[in-house]
Image (cartoon, coloured by chain):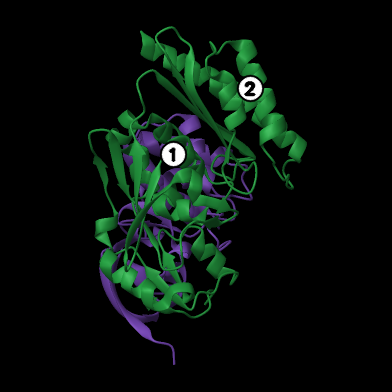
Amino acid sequence: MKPAPFEYYVPDSIEQTVELLHQHGDNAKLLAGGQSLVPAMNFRVVQPAILIDLNRVGELSYIREGDSLLRVGAMTRERQLEFDSAVAKRTPLLTEAAPFIAHPQIRNRGTIGGSIVNADPAAELPVLMLALNARLNARNASGERWVDAQDFFVGMFSTALDPDEILVEIELPFASPRTGWSFMEVAPRAGDYALMGVAALVALDENGRCTEARLVYLNAGDGPVNAKGAARMLEGEIPDEPVIQAAADSASQNEINPFGNIHASSDFQRHLARVLTRKTLKQATERARDGLQ
Amino acid sequence: MMQRYPVSLTVNGVSYQREVEARLLLSDFLRHELGLTGTHVGCEHGVCGACTIMFDGQSMRSCLIFAVQADGHEITTVEGLAESTDQLHPLQHAFWEAHGLQCGYCTPGILMTMIPFLQENPDPTEDEIRHALSGNLCRCTGYQHIVDAVKLAAQKMK
């Protein structure tokens, strides 16, 4: 036996889940894919008194394509996202980044909602939620509310969710036309935690000038780091080599705050951020230009 | 006395019913409750891949799933691969032929990762094989013979 004992509940609806959360609140922990929670329980770093298993709540697992949005249920497995054709068409950044989320065995079990709520600064999905301008639907026994991704991640492993709330749905706006995307990261071994990673989006007008850009970093601070200043440096410009270079220098020097670890000093992480920013912006710009033709 | 929960599941085509504590990991359930010790336990936090099994046909870490969660599901372990004790599965045979193992500790997890991988991708490149292997640690072989074995298996299984 590795984990400490806990009381176990297996609701089969959202309604039952929020009722359980209402009763048990802070004492309860929700079990989604368990790919981060169960390791922590095996080490007894986390010892929830009550575990509420979401794996039988079928209504939390779906990918629906609307007119301008994708709606993704929180219990959708990462592997489903990776191979979903609507995701590939509407939010290609997500499809490109999904294979970087741990290993296939983990993605078969891990969920989009679980990774978002875990809010690991080194995880891909929180970064992608910021990059894609996601909105997150939270529910408790008395109702629901929507939280923008940029307000959702409030610190290391912490989110705007209250103890009695569950993340139910992720709303992802379709990529707009003439928007290019790119995701890159550097990890010691495929599937390991990345030393640094960047999601980039570049939108161009008919003349090839950047109307909007986004740069979001993983493992670069105590949550996903949105480098708004560097993104603004691109706006109104034709994203050529010098413009991209300047944005990469600025983001890596001024906007991220990597802590360094046994595999990489913070200086090396900044170096990686500069190189990856350059590469992702270049690729995103090229893809946006392809969209112009 | 801890509460126990009924679990009814299929492992390698055989139905089992047991009562377990909720905190019992699927890896420990397979080994200690069912005596299926082919599923190995390495790091027990999802890093090494030794405990990989197939859960409804998909490879997963059995150390990161509670046994009670397998209720109603179909599990395949390494014991379910060979048709009989003297007839190995083509993948196992390829590992034997290409010296794809030394101590063998990581092998069951690698086999249970490669079965669905080769089903999805019957003609993989070396890069794809290495990528698919990235979630399984081997401390003996340097991976080269494992990659060779998977290539050989892909040829045999066509």
For label 2, count other residues whose C-alpha is less than 10 Å away and answer few (under 14), some (14-19) or many (20+): many
Q: Name the image quarter holding residue B114.
A: top left
Q: How far across and down, in percent of the image, does residue A275 sit?
A: 65, 25
**Mark 2 is on which residue type?**
Ala
**Mark 1 is on which residue type?**
Ala
A154 and B97: which is toward the camera? A154
Residue under the point 48% across and 60% down: B51
Chain for numbered disc 1: A
Can you tell which mark lies on residue A198?
Answer: none
A293 and A236: which is toward the camera? A236
In the image, residue A152 sits, relative to residue B63, either above or below, namely above
In the image, residue B42 sits, relative to residue A266, either above or below, namely below
What color is chain B drawn in?
A: purple
Q: How far across and down, in percent of the image, does residue A80 sit?
A: 33, 44
A18 and B1: which is toward the camera? A18
Q: Classify mark 1: helix, strand or loop.
A: helix
Task: Please name the residue that numbered disc 1 is placed on.
Answer: A98
Q: Classify mark 2: helix, strand or loop.
A: helix
Tell me how far mark 1 sits from mark 2, CA to CA: 26 Å
**The chain shown in green is which?**
A
Residue B156 in sight in this render: yes
Residue under the point 58% across and 45% down: A192
Q: Are marks 1 and 2 on the same chain?
A: yes
Task: Please name the residue that numbered disc 2 is placed on.
Answer: A247
Left or right placement of residue A11 versus residue A112 in this view: left
Q: How far across and down, in percent of the image, does residue A268 sit?
A: 74, 34
Left or right placement of residue A117 versus residue B12 in this view: right
Chain for numbered disc 2: A
Left or right placement of residue B111 versus residue A19 in this view: right
Image quadrant where one finds the C terminus of chain A: top left
B13 and A21: which is toward the camera? A21
Residue under the point 49% across and 43% down: A150
